[in-house]
Image (cartoon, rainbow, N blue to C red):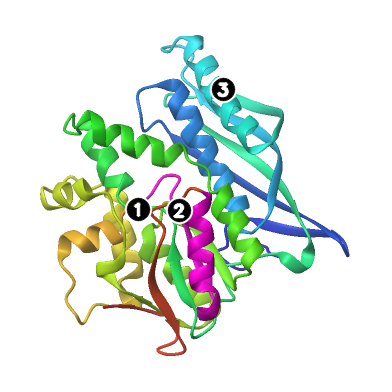
Amino acid sequence: MVGINLADDAGVYKLSSELAIVQTVDLITAIVDDPRTFGMIATANALSDIYAMGARPITALNVVAFPSDTMDIAVMTQILGGSLEKLNESGVTLVGGHSIRDKELKFGLCVTGTIHPDKVITNSNAKAGDKLILTKPLGTGILNTALKAGMLKADTQARVTRQMVRLNDKAADAMTTVGVNAATDVTGFGLIGHACEMAENSKVAVEIACDKVPFIEEALEFAGQGLIPAGMYDNMKFRADMVDNSKKIDEDLLAVLNDPQTSGGLLISVPAEKAEALLKSIKKKGDEEAVIIGKVLSKPESRIVLV
């Protein structure tokens, strides 16, 4: 039902008239020093693809690249322990995994979920007139870069960590209950990159009200200092031809909009008449920083309009 022809969050295979499986794999390098926290973040990040499709994750396989010649095996134990904590929270059963020796530590999961074939949510069905909701603030890529440079305050680091380990399950539950047209999770391609995929696949325009986009405040400050991950420049360059920035949005804010996120929130395209109900439900379930950040237009097709 959903394959490699579209840049969606997960693959979907129909087993019967009432059951489809949703599959994804996600692997990241260590972005925090604490192994347990890294395992939690990587797991929340992988599960997010399943939630973005409106599905319920049920099983997972660990994928580990580990520098066993230079790192104590206890580190892997802690990573797996943190991951299992998140899997238990989400009701997912760990059924196995695979590990290899590597010079750089990497961890992720293959995740399988289930859904009714008629209830699959893709990133290709946004409709003109829809409102766009973002469920988590931006800035994790920039702030993790600042963390590596030893410039991040302890309270900001704690806030970023809490956001990255938080599952998207509650927002997903809200959107499947209320009913939406399209969704995607905001991860490595940044908000603009994932909005581009939605606009391109849905053959619509996405208008983003930049002053409404939530971000962790310090991210803008560090962007101004040039503490920006290399992936941001790749994101900006790759999608430059699709973005209308005639309003000349500030360069530091543009960096935040293109910032590669780890375990980011959901970007949801919902009919306008359902937007407030969905937003209220998402906030009630715990994602209190969710906000309406824009709307879907019929034209210019396959474009992002920054206002």
Residue 193 rendering spot, x and y as whole percentages: 40, 64
Which quarter of the rendering shows the C terminus?
bottom left
83 relative to 169, above or below: above
Residue 154 rendering spot, x and y as whole percentages: 23, 28
Depth check, front residue: 200 or 151: 151
In the rendered view, does 142 fall on the left or right side of 41?
A: left
**Other residues around mark 3 within 10 Å, as few (<14) / some (14–19) / many (≥20):** many
Give, as a three-letter code, the residue at label 3.
Answer: Leu
Residue 149 rendering spot, x and y as whole percentages: 19, 32
Badges 1 and 2: C-beta atoms under 8 Å apart?
A: yes
Residue at screen point 56% across, 28% down: 83
Residue 113 rendering spot, x and y as whole percentages: 71, 48
Give, as a three-letter code, the residue at label 2.
Answer: Gly
Point out the residue furthest to the bottom here: 299
Which quarter of the rendering shows the N terminus?
bottom right
Distance (Cα) linking label 1 and label 2: 7 Å
Give the residue number, with chain letter if any, for mark 3.
Answer: 80
The reply to whether residue 1 is in sight is no
Q: Toward which corner of the image does residue 243 lie, by quadrant?
A: bottom left
Circle 1: element type: loop
Which of the marked residues, 3 or 1, is nearer the chain's N terminus? 3
Q: Which residues are magenta?
A: 261-285
Circle 3: element type: helix
**Picture disc at residue 216:** none
The reply to whether residue 234 is in sight is yes
**Picture disc at residue 265:** 2
137 relative to 68, above or below: below
Residue at screen point 29% across, 67% down: 212
Numbered-mark total: 3
**Picture disc at residue 137:** 1
**Other residues around mark 1 within 10 Å, as few (<14) / some (14–19) / many (≥20):** some
**Other residues around mark 2 within 10 Å, as few (<14) / some (14–19) / many (≥20):** many
